[in-house]
Amino acid sequence: MQNRKKLIEELLESIHTIKHKFVLDSHSFSDNAQVTYSQWIVLRVVRQYGGIGIKEIASKLGITSSAATQLVDGLAKRGYLKREGSPEDRRALKISLSDKGQEKISGMKTRSLERLSSIFDVFDDVELAKYCELNKKIVNKMLGR
């Protein structure tokens, strides 16, 4: 049991290091900081859940509705997001990617993949497939699937 705890501790440290590296590198592919890392994450959430409300964005990011509104406002002003009324509730707004937002996220994703994919060169194809499988298992558990 003690060995398992030590391995988990090492694994969590590794995950933290990988995340930190991704965050640092993400700042350098964002077109001279036109989009911050936080805004990039909002774009990704909106792309994944299209037609999502501010409260849902805040919940998924673990931030306040006020903070989510500020991020969305900045992205909407630049034309990356659009707000649409909800057919179910006229008071509610649904946030989705604009065409410009789709292009932006596609470009950033491509540049990110080009810059960061080399870190996985330490794996051969079989190891990479196994690593992906194990990561999906963890993500599914965390998401209650």
Image (spheres, rainbow, N blue to C red):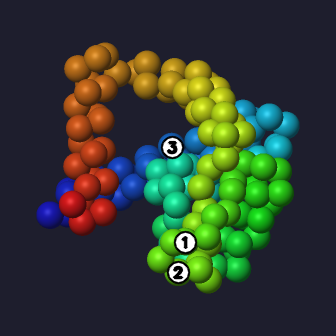
Q: Which residue is mark 1?
A: 86
36 left or right of 144 in image: right
Tell me if residue 78 comes above or below residue 83 in the rendering. Answer: above
The residue drawn where x is 59% and y is 26% is: 110
Q: Quadrant of the C terminus?
A: bottom left
**Residue 105 marker:** none
Classify mark 1: helix, strand or loop.
loop
Residue mark closest to the camera, 1 vs 3: 1
Q: Amino acid at mark 1?
A: Ser
* Residue depicted at 30% across the width and 44% down the height: 135
Disc 1 and disc 2 in contact, CB within 8 angstroms? yes
Q: Which residue is mark 3?
A: 18
Q: Is residue 95 visible?
A: yes
Residue depth check, mark 2 versus mark 3: number of the one nearer the observer: 2
Residue 53 location, x and y as percent? 56, 71
Name the residue at the left extreme: 1
> Label 2 crowding class (10 Å Cα cut-off): few <14, some 14-19, many 20+?
few
**Residue 109: percent from the left, percent from the top?**
59, 33
Q: Which mark is residue 89?
A: 2
